[in-house]
Amino acid sequence: MSKPIGIEVSLAVAEAVGLCDVDVVAAYPITPQTHIVEHLSELVADGHLNAEFVPVESEHSAMSACIGSSAAGARTFTSTCSQGYALMSELCYIAASLRLPIVMAVANRALSAPINIWNDHADLMYARDTGWIQLISENGQEAVDMSILSFRIGEDPRVALPVQVNLDGFTMSHVVEPIEIPDQAVIKKFLPPFKPKYRLDPANPMTFGAVGMPDIYTEARMMQDQALKATKPVIQEIFDDFAKQFGRQYKLVESYKTEGAETIVVAIGSVAQTGMTAIDAMRAKGKKVGIVRIRVFRPFPAAELFEAIKGAKNLVLFDRVSSFAGGEISGPVALEIKSVLFDKGVAPKVGNFLVGLGGRDVTEQNFEEMVERVESAKNGDLPAYEFINVRE
Amino acid sequence: MAKETGIQSWKDLKFGILVSTPGNAAELKTGDWRSMRPETDREKCTKCGQCYIFCPDMVYSKDAEGYFPQNYYWCKGCGICAKECPVDAITMIQEVD
């Protein structure tokens, strides 16, 4: 095993993608994703990585090039965020429907307006319904590990779907962290060559992306839904295999100090790391609190999540984007969790808090305040959702 | 049946909704879409072949006598042939069934 080195997370992600022996990188720079593709272009230009780097004219072209390259059988990577994601989004649906295992790192950033380059989960949730697998990392090491995992998961013949690696913009992408970059030999053992079931091949012509009339569209959508659902056990199996080779164990849903917890916080992304520190402080004061972090947002691990939170009397659900005036909920994380609870007939006290929008810091104190708020509220007193730290 | 209509179970769909036999659109029975059917009056027909040239599908082809009979498997009933026929030999007839 290699030793951890101090490295900017974006560069570490680019190094990991390079070590995965990617064939094609087609990307357009956008803050705060820039350093990822910048470093990949350096690796190619300096001869360290034998890959085709396509400097496209927009994110729309980036994903178009990726679709062509993946369909031709090349291991393909791109990266974007925010407005760039929005521009490429129509192609993202197609990549998933055509079952192309493109890997994309998203340095999560808020969407305009007002123009804001800082971190929240607007792009992560915008991508929710595109049919991609969505992995979430909370620190630099996880961003590297998820990048390696993404190629293995996406290219597994039982999966054959594109994978999005989410890492928080600036909070993670621009931070120097101690990160262990695995040896290429170990990665090679873990990640077999990409052998797609079907590919664009003049010797064996096929049509990718034909029209589907009302007679067949529903069946195509059913097939895609079943395909994404069926990836859940495969993702866990690959997480387990990763643990054997690299020593770090990941799960679809990860719990921290939830044993005997009366109040459970659910959060995703880097704020969950702050959350764990806050939980330690609250536990030290004798509070029965824990935190649950969602590692895979699509396919949504409903059963695993219910197991993790079912014992809680109070739930504190953090969302980092507003879907604007949802009926009862406005946060996508809370939307999923409340649906699970309703189906199971379980009704704890639930507070849904919209935090950390457009780069606003989420502090340990925020966690303590929200836990206190839900614990002290009488049932029915809590609003459906609240913006936190908003100035009146 | 599936080849003519494209109708099949989601379980039988090709992975990634790929089409592995290029050119198979010829098997799709677009004649099902038709509400009007073109019929040629051979008394008026001059065998000029304008119907064959203008048909956006592959409905018309020349027979041994030089006439251009319709293949209703593909005819969607668009009526372009009737409109373009220089001697008004083609009439659009309402499909009753």
Image: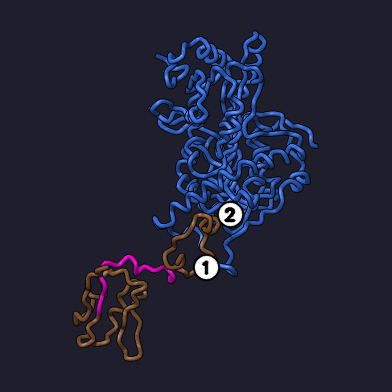
Chain colours: A blue, B brown
Q: Position of residue A238 (x, y in %)?
A: 69, 42
Q: Which mark is residue A70?
A: 2
Is residue B63 placed above or below A277 in the rendered structure?
A: below
**Pointer 1: residues within 10 angstroms few (<14), some, or many (20+)?**
few
Task: Determine whether, in the image, residue A23 is placed left or right of residue A92.
Answer: right
**Pointer 2: residues within 10 angstroms few (<14), some, or many (20+)?**
many
Is residue B6 placed above or below A291 in the rendered structure?
A: below
Callout 1 amino acid:
Thr
> Which of B22/A17 is in front?
B22
Q: Who's the residue at 43% across and 71% down the image?
A: B26
Callout 2 amino acid:
Ser
Q: Position of residue A117 (x, y in %)?
A: 49, 31
> Which of A46/A305 is in front?
A305
Q: Position of residue A186 (x, y in %)?
A: 77, 44
**What segment is highlighted magenta in the picture?**
B25-39
Q: Quadrant of residue A306?
A: top right
Task: Determine whether, in the image, residue A45 is placed left or right of residue A384.
Answer: right
> Which of A41/A262 is in front?
A262
Q: Is residue B66 magenta?
A: no
